[in-house]
Image (cartoon, rainbow, N blue to C red):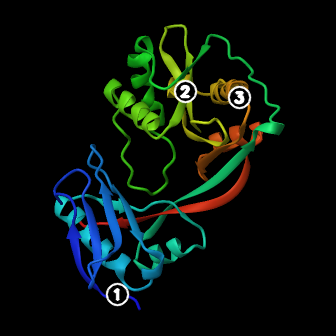
Amino acid sequence: MRRMVTRINALTDPSGDNPVWIAEGDDGRPLGTARLFIPAGGGAADLRITVHPAERRTGVGTRLLHAAVGSATERGLPGLLGPAVEEGSAGESFCVASGMRRVLALTYTRLDLAVFRGEAGAVDGYRLVHWAGAVPDELAGTYARSRRAMDDMPMDDAAWTPDVWDVERLHRVAAAVAERGEILLTTAAIGADGEIAGFTEVVVAGDGAGDGQHYGTGVLPEHRGRGLARWLKAAQIEEIRARFPKLEGLLADTADSNTVMRRVNDALGYRPTHRSLLYQIDLPR
């Protein structure tokens, strides 16, 4: 028998950076959780709602959503961005029923490493460097500066605020990946001035098997149009294949409107697997 939701409790300080709520049934058992990730730049917060499969379609998710919306409204945030939900899934049905607005479409692709035949195609005036884990000290400053290459990636109607990067954050991200038992691999292109002009990242399981996951690829605006993105990705793929012979594939997700990166991935042999959608709640300010 399904349990009635009797209360929504805050598990953390609702005024903190990442508030969490839990929905409990009348017997005290947890039925679901909601979490907000508040960006440092003050843009829309990322919303994550998880409900036990047996408790779905009973109002649990709706009550958790109301708690998150109330907190975000009090903070004066412009909106809440939900996670990417697969097209046609129960997650999309919940977003639509909750009045969320579709703001971005993503296509997920996979590269079969066994059949990859790409060519690196070096770009004159640049050299490539590869590293695993934390960025080397001598490159940390320029790598942090190069992260602005992602600031103008297509996000369509999403109320997205670019991340603020510094050396400390670079180290935190690398440490978080290592703590999960995974390996963060980065390839960067360095120009004649010694500054990083572009980069690409992949995370691989600690045993080097299965599929790796792309984290991001970016080229600074002043270095675009020269083929750096394709060179970076092709060279990193070859590096990964040599280092992790058990790795089977690489996964990527790209906004449908990001035509430049889609062309690069298509040329390298990435093939679509499924499509997801991003929904947003717009809040009054």
3 vs 1, front mark = 1
| Residue 109 higher or lower than 97, as above or below | above
Precedes in sequence: disc 3 or disc 1: 1
What is the CA distance from the residue labelled 2 to the residue labelled 3? Answer: 12 Å
Name the amino acid type tagged 1: Arg
Q: Is residue 163 visible?
A: yes
Q: Position of residue 60 (x, y in %)?
A: 35, 79
Name the amino acid type tagged 2: Phe
Q: Position of residue 167 (x, y in %)?
A: 34, 24
- Give the residue number, with chain letter if any, for mark 2: 199
Residue nearer the viewer, 230 or 28: 28
| Residue 185 higher or lower than 247, as above or below | above
What is the CA distance from the residue labelled 3 to the residue labelled 1? Answer: 53 Å
The residue furthest bottom is 1
- Give the residue number, with chain letter if any, for mark 3: 234
Precedes in sequence: disc 1 or disc 2: 1
With 89 as the anchor, is 32 left or right in this view? Answer: left
Name the amino acid type tagged 3: Ala
